[in-house]
Amino acid sequence: MVIDVETGGFNSRTDALLEIGAVLLQMDEQGILSIKKSVCTNVDPFQGAIIEPSAIEFNKIDLQDPNRMALHERDALQTVFRPIRREISITGCTRAIMVAHNAHFDLGFINAAAERNQVKRNPFHPFSCFDTCTLAGLAYGQTVLGRACQSANIHYENNEAHNALYDAIKTAEIFCRIINRWRELGGVRLG
């Protein structure tokens, strides 16, 4: 599962989780990885959460937008976790490994929110993840998501960036491109 979060700062314990974008991947019979489906939810900041003005300026989230329809943090997590848990059950796995760009940042916010809301079955492995920042640096010589996408010939709109769903989709596309290319070059098949 590919995840992207938009937040009110950099500290997963104190700063607000504001958006979660998630993209479920699938592998066909030939071992080709692709996007299966996606989900996104806006998150209502938890009581006492810090929201840095610079973070809001950066991600352009309007917390007062009546169309935002933000969910309580626990409900937002369940919205994202539900399809992951289904996929885990179908595949016979015990945990999902998060894929994200700067993955430990996203994993930290998801884990902190799950802990804060006493979610008993966080589907993600608590510390293992695939980081597309590192993988893209290796595969394309670029660690910034937009630049990595451009190097991989994946269409990328800078004015759409820093939207959780858009960034999750672009992260999924770059991850699939890298993994599928790895397989073409004789690498071991994932899954």
Image (cartoon, rainbow, N blue to C red):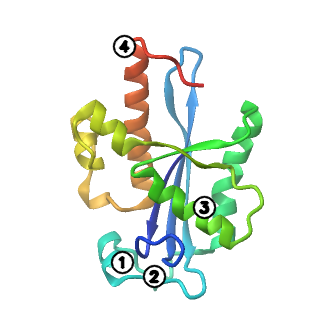
Q: Secondary structure at mark 4?
A: loop
Q: Which mark is residue 185?
A: 4
The amino acid sitting under disc 4 is: Leu
Q: Which residue extends farthest front?
A: 127
The numbered disc on residue 38 is none
For badge 1, the amino acid type reads Ile
Disc 4 versus disc 1: nearer the observer: 4
Disc number lying in front (4 or 2): 4
Which of the marked residues, 4 or 1, is nearer the chain's N terminus?
1
User: Relative to residue 98, is residue 183 drawn left or right?
Assistant: left
Q: Say which label, 2 or 3, has the lower sequence index.
A: 2
Alpha carbon of mark 2 to alpha carbon of mark 1: how far? 9 Å
Q: Which amino acid type is shown beneath numbered disc 3?
A: Asn
Looking at the rendered structure, the secondary structure element under dot 3 is: helix
- Sequence-wise, the earlier of marks 2 and 1 is 1
Nearer the observer: mark 3 or 1; the answer is 3
Residue placed under numbered mark 1 in the picture? 56
Counting from the top left corner in percent of width and height, residue 23 is at 53, 46
Q: CA distance from mark 4 to mark 3?
A: 35 Å
On the picture, is 165 further left or further right than 138?
Answer: right
Disc 4 crowd, CA 10 A, few/some/many (<14, 14-19, 20+): few
Mark 2: amino acid = Leu
Q: CA distance from mark 2 to mark 3?
A: 23 Å
Which residue has dot 2 on it? Answer: 63
Marks 2,1: beta carbons within 8 A = yes
Q: Which residue is mark 3?
A: 111
- Near mark 3 (Cα within 10 A), the count class, few <14, some 14-19 or many ≥20, is many
Q: Point out the frontmost of discs 4 and 3.
A: 3
Q: Secondary structure at mark 2?
A: loop
Quarter of the image where the N terminus is located = top right
Q: In terms of sequence position, does the residue under pointer 4 or pointer 3 come before the other?
A: 3
